[in-house]
Image (cartoon, rainbow, N blue to C red):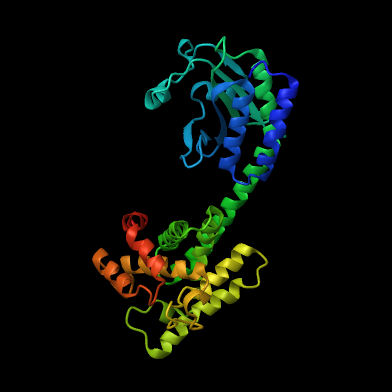
Amino acid sequence: MGDCNTNNILKLLFSYMPKIAEERKMDGLLILMADLGRSLVGADRCSLWLVDEQKSELWTKVAHGVAELRIPSNLGFVGYTLNSGESLCIKDAYEDSRFDSRSDLKTNYHTKSVLTVPLKNSEGRIIGVFQAINKKEPPYYFSSQDIEYLSLTAVYSEKTIESALLTKELEETQAEILYMLGEVSEHRSKETADHVMRVAACCYKMACYFGLSEYEANQIRLAAPLHDLGKVGIPDAILQKTGKFTPEEYEVMKTHTVLGHHLLRNSSRKLLQLAAEMAIGHHEHWNGSGYPSGLSGEKIPLSSRICAVADVFDALMSTRCYKEAWSEDMVKDFFIKQRNSQFQKELVDILLSHWDEFIEIYK
């Protein structure tokens, strides 16, 4: 499509604008932008690479459901454009010393013509590189006009990508803070910080298998580390006790659910409201025998039901100050016995049918 006229370009841009405006995830944006670039210049493949300054790498997303690709930030044509700020229009990659052919060897793909243009932010700093590979129409290599078209896409992408990068950074910061808060409560009870991360990962996987959307499952993952936040209000003598609780001590220990809820409930943030819900509900039992409210069945919020399974699974598999780790068979038997009793049967079935995946998270 290197010879497409201005009207065709405008049609393409307008057809992609609604999709791009609605997309909230960075992965999806990268794919949409790459598709737009590929259509504009008639390439077989197109990728939008972004800089990861902490790791000195460039990364991209090539398709939904496919793990991101990463390369050193000084490698190949994209590395050259990133560091020099120059666009490249290469007729035959294998005749250029800057070409890194290892990716072709890995994928059984043959790179011929290549086009790269820098992606700059509002301050003029290069934050990524657009790369198009293998022109599909004669003369099978890219032209100066194609550079203009891909540069146009880069300019169009700039604000959207910059905004998405800021959102991504804020979300990652938020997640890190939630994990740190969760680790505080676990540290006081002498548990490892890894516990909250494992519970969060198990919650996410279980939510996905239960049929929740990616967004809903991810919200549960982010909120899960705060499920035991109320432990910060439990006296050390009880929290760190190695022996069995007295009835009075057990009643005090149970209040961590209400304390956690009270700490989180007044937030206007939906994520922290979800965390409050999980804090107060993760010790409720499907049959109504749990605490603090004796809720049963679907009266227990789904997030709390999911967290209950993930939390007990990790606790039983782990060595604690009051117990040794259980064997896998012992843990399986426990969940089979508590199916439709302490836990919702569908969630137990997910755990058992995907056992190896949950064990991998634990390990």
Left or right position of 195 against 299? left
Residues 363 and 304: in front is 304
Q: Residue at x 65, y 68 (%)?
A: 267
User: Residue 316, relative to residue 77: is it above or below?
Assistant: below
In this orientation, which residue lies closer to the viewer: 11 or 177? 11
Q: How many marks?
A: 0
Q: In the shown orientation, is residue 241 left or right of residue 204? A: left
Which picture quadrant has residue 245?
A: bottom left
Where is residue 211? Give x, y as percent. 48, 58
Q: Is residue 335 visible from the viewing direction of this image?
A: yes
Could you say where residue 169 lies in the image, as x and y percent from the top left? 60, 47
Where in the figure is residue 49, as x and y percent of width and height?
A: 56, 32
Q: Quadrant of the C terminus?
A: bottom left
Residue 266 vertical position relative to residue 149 in the rendered view, above or below = below
The spot of residue 326 in percent (x, y) is 27, 68
**Observer-nearest of 236 and 15:** 15
Whether residue 123 is visible to the viewer of this picture, yes or no, is no
Residue drawn at (65%, 18%) of the image: 147
Residue sitting at the far bottom: 248
Q: Nearer the viewer, residue 19 or 152?
A: 19
Q: Quadrant of residue 273?
A: bottom right
